[in-house]
Image (cartoon, rainbow, N blue to C red):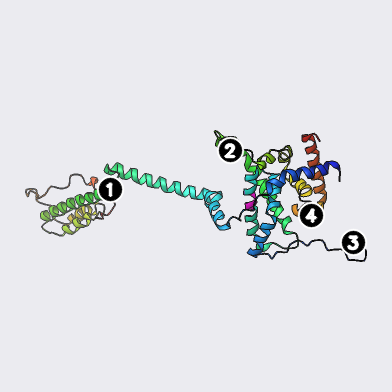
Amino acid sequence: MQSIDEPAADPPRPESYEPGSEADFERLYRNTYRRILGTLITIVRDRAVAEDCAQETYERAFRSWSRWRPDAPAEAWLHRIAINVAISDRRRERLRQAGEVIRRLGRPAAGSDPSLAAERSDLLRAMKKLPPKQAAALVLRHYHGYSNREIATALGVPEQTVASRLAAARKQLQAVLGR
Amino acid sequence: MSDNERELELELHRVLDPLTAMPIPPREGRLARGAVRTVLGGAGAAVALKLMTGVAVAAAAVTVAGAATTGSINPLDWGQQVSQHGQAVASDARHHGNGNGNGNGNGNTNGNGSSNAHGNNGNANDHAKDKNKGHTPPTKGDPPSDPEPTDPAIHPTVTVSPQP
């Protein structure tokens, strides 16, 4: 147990990155990829699409990497971009659906990949039915452990908006899942 | 934190952790991917498609016109046909010029005939007629060495210089 006299350990500092540095961007990519992918999976149709969206996210981020200002966490900035990419993808999804049905015709059924089973979970399906911004707030809060303030920074909205989105998302999830 | 929220967190980790536990793929090259998207998508694709359509339509029009005129789809034949046409016109012009020259007693019209051979839209005929002005018309009793071209309107449509 920590002594009262001892100074409290500093919370782990977020990684620092130099804007415009390609090596730092590569490090940012490796440090954040899985978390960005986790957010995207809850918003877009499936993991493959989420991976595409993740790549597009980093592509967009890299284009403005030299203009990024380190006054906000880089991961929050990436999440903001990722959510915008996911929202754009959802808009395109309706157009894709018709072609997807045709492509799947005649294919064998999916195997027993555990990740595919996870994708078919009721929770994930329910989250994909949420408005993208609500789903994003939910996953940032309850999966990544962001505070409402950090989510507000990431999404560029007031904290109150985050709180109301979270409340609405939880309410809808409870209605869908019966919990 | 309520029980519901705790349960939500556990469920999210149970579902998402396996999905995100895979190896991190290499970051896709920005240039390759960007270039492909520029060509295949967006406004670039629309402009490229329009350009390609325009070129294809123009090529088809040229082919149809050439084939309809010469009866052959081989572009080499089109050039040959024009060349032959030009030679025929030149020949007519020479005959025409010689005929007038003989009739007028001067040979200046030969030069005009030559210019027509190069496809100047029948100017040789016109010049030859102009040069007849002020000269004594040919004597009716003298038979011309060559007959006049019967229909000058046949040839003036040739506008392309023959290129062998």
User: Which mark's residue is nearer the viewer, 1 or 2?
Assistant: 2
Nearer-N-terminus badge (3/2): 3
Q: Up-down: is A111 above or below B91?
A: above
State left or right for residue A171 relative to residue B133.
Answer: right
- Label 1 – label 3 distance at C-alpha: 97 Å
Query: Would you say the residues marked 3 and 2 are in contact, meaning their CB atoms lie under 8 Å apart?
Result: no
Quarter-of-image position of residue A118 = top right
Residue A28 horizontal/vertical position (percent): 68, 59
In this orientation, which residue lies closer to the viewer: A39 or A111?
A: A111
Q: Up-down: is A25 above or below B141?
A: below
Q: Which residue is mark 1?
A: B78
* Residue at x-position 52% and y-position 51%: B39
Please, what is the three-letter code of the amino acid marked with disc 2? Glu
Q: Are marks 4 and 1 on the same chain?
A: no
What residue span does the magenta drawing correspond to?
A: A52-56
Name the quadrant of the N terminus of chain A.
bottom right
Q: Which residue is mark 4?
A: A150
Residue furthest right as drawn: A4
